Image: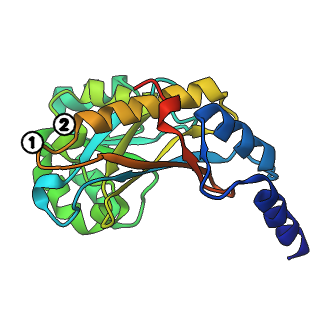
Amino acid sequence: MTKLSKRIRAIRDKVEIGKHYSIHDAVALLKEVSSVKFSEVVDVAVNLGIDPKKSDQAVRGATTLPHGTGKNVRVAVFAQGDAAEAARESGADLVGMEDLAEDIKAGNMNFDVVIAEPAAMRVVGLLGQVLGPRGLMPNPKTGTVTPDVTTAVKNAKAGQVRYRIDKNGIIHGAIGSLNFDASALKENLEALILDLKKAKPASAKGVFLSKITLSTTMGPGLIIDQASLEV
């Protein structure tokens, strides 16, 4: 408990509440206050100027990060025939139909992303109660329901992150690892922000990107000065 208190005090001494940090300063500070022995995930929270209760202001999609996430992504694909073979050749970790569905129902969830060809949704649709709460249900808007499983698998393996607003109108996602250099994290964040801007609902009024906060697994949240981003 004493160690935890010292760590928290050290963070509080270095972090200025309410300050807007440039992306490079934020990454440098997160690295400085990190005291764990593993490479922490760098997360971003983007507050959007939308009404999450309105269906026409829902924001959902996917972004392929130019420098990946730093994580080895395991991909499960629901497909058969040529599409199944294409998925395997593209690096999918699990490929199947009813057999894969049965494994999932049995609690075998050793994957991070689920992709399905359209014809397979008759099987995947029955897994909604299992995949849905975990954010794993394939969806055309995120490119995970597609006839082109080859591209979908390659995107997932390359570091594609999916996003959707929560009930408070906030997008959450990982943009890399703390062992990335600041330039790589900046470019990953810019890719996400650019896609969010493209996804702005026509009915959304006022400032769309109201706040961007960067944090790590065990670290503080730092508000990012949007002027430091080139998007």
Residue found 44% across the figure and 27% down from its top: 158
Can residue 180 be seen at all in this image of the molecule? yes
Total residue callouts: 2
- Element class at badge 2: loop
Does 29 sit left or right of 148 as displayed?
right
| Tag 1 residue | 119
Q: Mark 1 is on which residue type?
A: Ala
Residue found 42% across the figure and 38% down from its top: 93
| Tag 2 residue | 80
Label 1 vs 2, first from the N-terminus: 2
Does 38 sit left or right of 226 as displayed?
right
Give the mark toward the camera: 1 or 2.
Answer: 1
**How far is mark 1 from mark 2, CA to CA?**
9 Å
Tell me the colour scheme of the image. Answer: rainbow
* Tag 1 and tag 2, C-beta contact below 8 Å: yes
Give the residue at the far bottom of this rendering: 1
Does 38 sit left or right of 176 as displayed?
right
